[in-house]
Image (cartoon, rainbow, N blue to C red):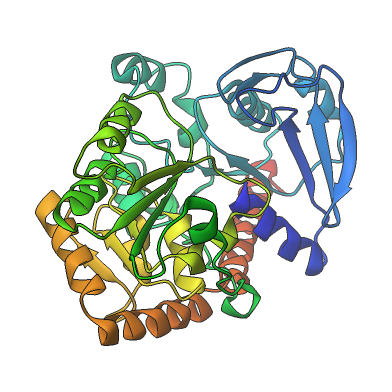
Amino acid sequence: MVVARELVRRLVDRGHAVDVVTTTLVDLHEKPSRRTSVATVDGARVHYLATPLHYRWMGITPTLPWWLAKLPKPDVVHIYGFRDPVTTVTAAWCRRRRIPYVFEPCGMFRRRFRKVGLKRILDSSLYRSVPWGAEAIAVVSDLEGRDVAARGLPRERVAVRWNGFPDPSEMPLPSGRLRNELGIPDSAPVVLYVGRIAAGKGVEHLLEAARQLESVHVVLVGSDDRHGTMNVVAAAQSSTVTGGRVHVLPFDPVSPLWLYPEADLFVLASAGDSFGLVAAEAAAAGTPVVVTDRAGIAGSFREGEAIVVPDDRDAVVGAVKRVLGDDSLRARLSDGGRTAARRNSWDRVADVQEEIYRAVASRTASTNDSTDGP
């Protein structure tokens, strides 16, 4: 997970002792290990707990309570994610031992797509204590903060931390690799999307742009989330209008950053994203960005740093036409994206995260002192 890795690395560099407890899940296709292992990663001790069973990304780790008890008592616990056994058990363990924790929903708080009715029932029963028991709820955008507040959680516990952008100086330069691999002519504009190929991601808007702009190639990089969207993509690939100009590539978990400078435009046409790190990566690479106002990252951009449009097909397609048809606008957006990246650095985000931890720890210490009495 990019966010956890970036924050953990900086927290260790600042002198904090960090233990990370996670499952052995690597991806949805590879069978997770049934053996627990401990490794040092970026200065932190990472405990990969034996995961004999899993459903999608939800890992079942029977030894979790034992490992939590074995670790040195932490000052603060940071829980990433929602509606899974690891976060639920860890939150309960913290509450029993009066250890303060920060809950970060990672975009999962809003009930969407699969089994919405079941999520509603579980959120009001089994999972309810996870957010309500947290001393602070870290969200990555004002948009996600409103989602949390809409469920009745105290606004004073919600801390908008945002997420960081990569350092532009560390981003790769364009190499022509993508065009060579896909056989795209040098004169043809490339519109890139990176993320799950799923409902609500606006993929159909990009396919419409390809229909209306006869030279545009659309490159979709990501896995099929089985919402039926890949069927729409396949139809576009076989269409006489867009055939040969719609490409699908698997996501590269090792080094996806090389993709961004290969494109003329990056589009995140989401109907709802708590943040949208892929747009941050594209901006840091100097690739012009179009993003909807339903993606939390829209609030990280200032005027001239990205094109922000409503979640609407005509608005998205119109923005694609506008950017691809204006060389000077693309140049301004390229510079603006890098400016946004430098302003929204991970070091700045780590500063905010440290303040959240300090506030939670000091609040809890004060509460314990007053409870214990003289």
Horizontally, residue 163 falls left or right of residue 172, namely: left
Residue 199 image offset from top left, x and y in percent: 29, 33
Residue 112 can be seen, yes or no: no
Instruction: Give the image quarter of residue 366.
Output: bottom right
Q: Is residue 199 visible?
A: yes
Q: Position of residue 166 (x, y in %)?
A: 58, 69
Question: Does residue 18 appear left or right of residue 4 in this picture?
Answer: right
Task: Give the residue displayed 67% in from the left and 36% down from the top.
Answer: 98
- Observer-nearest of 188 and 132: 188
Residue at the farthest left position? 314
* 140 over 133 or under it: above or below: below
Q: Nearer the viewer, residue 107 or 67?
A: 107
Q: Front-most of 35 and 26? A: 26
Q: Is residue 37 above or below residue 352?
A: above
- Image location of residue 278, percent across then percent down: 47, 56
Which quadrant of the structure image shows residue 113? top left
Q: Left or right: 281 with respect to 287?
A: right
Query: Image point 41% across, 85% down: which residue?
Result: 335
